Each structure stands twice: as C-alpha cells, then as structure tokens.
Amino acid sequence: MLPVAMLKRLTQGKPRAKLRITRKQYEGRQPWMVAGMNRKKFEEIIVELPDETIDALYRDAEADRLVEAIFGKVD
C-alpha cells in the first residue's frame, strides 16, 4: 500500500481523483456527458473546484440517499 503523501501526489490534478472514483468508474459513467459538456472543459472545471465544494456535494448526496432509505422516495 502506498503512503498517503505519495498517493496524493500521484492523483493530484486528476478529475477522477477529485470525484473519488476509479478510472474505470470515471470512463464508464462519463460524467462529462451527463453534464452535457465536452470532456476537456468538464475536467478543467472539476480540477479547479475547491475540495470543500466536492465534500459538500458528497455530504448532500449522502444525506439524500439516507433520507430516501429511511422514508422512501418522496416526490
């Protein structure tokens, strides 16, 4: 297993690392297509986002999943 500092250097600047997904997941999901953007522009935006923004988005999504799991889907 790689030390944390080395792992951070290897993944620094990679949009998939910021999104906390593997390369295979990134290629399979094609988030740039879901966003309706070309890949290069999408990756530029993701890399520029502060880590705090990504963290907030993950917390919101997790909260939504938990609420749906507890109360079911609410329209």
Image (spheres, rainbow, N blue to C red):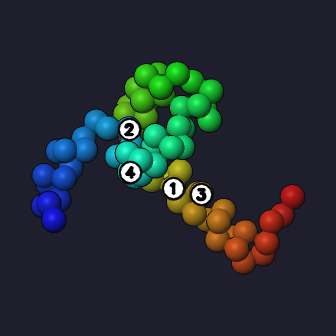
Q: Residue at x 41, y 47 (%)?
A: 24
- Looking at the image, tell me whether mark 3 or mark 2 is earlier in sequence order: 2
Q: Marks 3 and 2, how far apart in space?
A: 18 Å
- Looking at the image, tell me whether mark 1 or mark 2 is earlier in sequence order: 2
Q: Amino acid at mark 4?
A: Thr
In the picture, the disc for residue 58 is 1
Q: Residue at x 70, y 74 (%)?
A: 69
Q: Quadrant of the C terminus?
A: bottom right
- Looking at the image, tell me whether mark 4 or mark 2 is earlier in sequence order: 2
Question: Height in image: 22 above or below 30?
Answer: below
Residue where numbered disc 2 is placed: 15
Label 1 or label 4, whichever lies nearer to me, is: 4
Q: Element under label 4?
A: loop
Q: Residue at x 64, y 71 (%)?
A: 66
Q: Amino acid at mark 1?
A: Tyr
Q: Is residue 54 visible?
A: no
